[in-house]
Image (cartoon, helix red, strand yellow):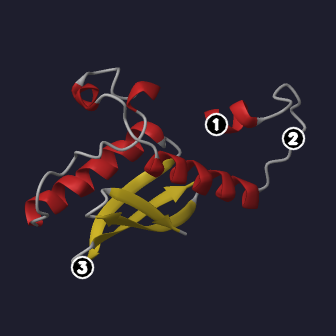
Amino acid sequence: MSLLQLLSDNNPTDESDSYTEENQIKFLLDELKMLFSSRTFFTYIGDVPLVNSSILNYGIDENMVEGNINNQQFDLIEQYIEILLSRFEPRFASVSVAINKVTIFKVYIEISAWYENYPIKLMLDWDIERRRFNLNE
């Protein structure tokens, strides 16, 4: 059970709660949406050991890519998402992030991972102008 599930559980001491496989995937998607829609408060703490994986650094640094998007920045986006998932979604294994498609307004990113012996494939898009992620289920 994840921290967010525990915090949202009305009766956390009741071990008879049933978290079905279907519910687990729904919780996972909800938490990923929260991660990709949250913003870091201090952009500089991403480089501070121990603090960078704490709740203080939870979410996206909107300034991870500055200026016009180019191939070098695509690599930075991929690396940033891999680091973000390794810090805040430890239930994932074998995470792979790849730029799938680029348009004038958006960068489409494919995330592949393993979650409890099941392959997961997610599409994420990065709105270049608004600097926002959108998780497509």
Residue 116, visible in the rendered structure: no
Q: Which residue is mark 3?
A: 103
Nearer to us of marks 1 and 3 is 3
Farthest residue toward the front?
130
Element class at badge 2? loop
Residue type of the residue flagged with mark 2: Asp
Q: Is residue 18 toward the left or the right of residue 134 in the image?
A: right
For label 2, the residue is: 17
Q: Find the distance from the CA under tag 1 to the CA under tag 2.
A: 15 Å
Residue 92, position in %: x, y?
Answer: 49, 50
Q: Is residue 136 left or right of residue 52?
A: right
Residue 25 coordinates in the image, percent (x, y): 65, 58
**In the image, which is nearer the foreground, mark 1 or mark 2?**
1
Q: Which residue is mark 1?
A: 4
Q: Which mark is residue 66?
A: none
- The answer to whether 95 is drawn above or below residue 84 in the figure is below
Q: Residues within 10 Å of mark 2 (few under 14, many from 20)?
A: few
Q: Looking at the image, is mark 1 or mark 2 earlier in the sequence?
A: 1
Q: How many marks?
A: 3
- Residue 97, above or below 38: below
State the SS at label 3: loop
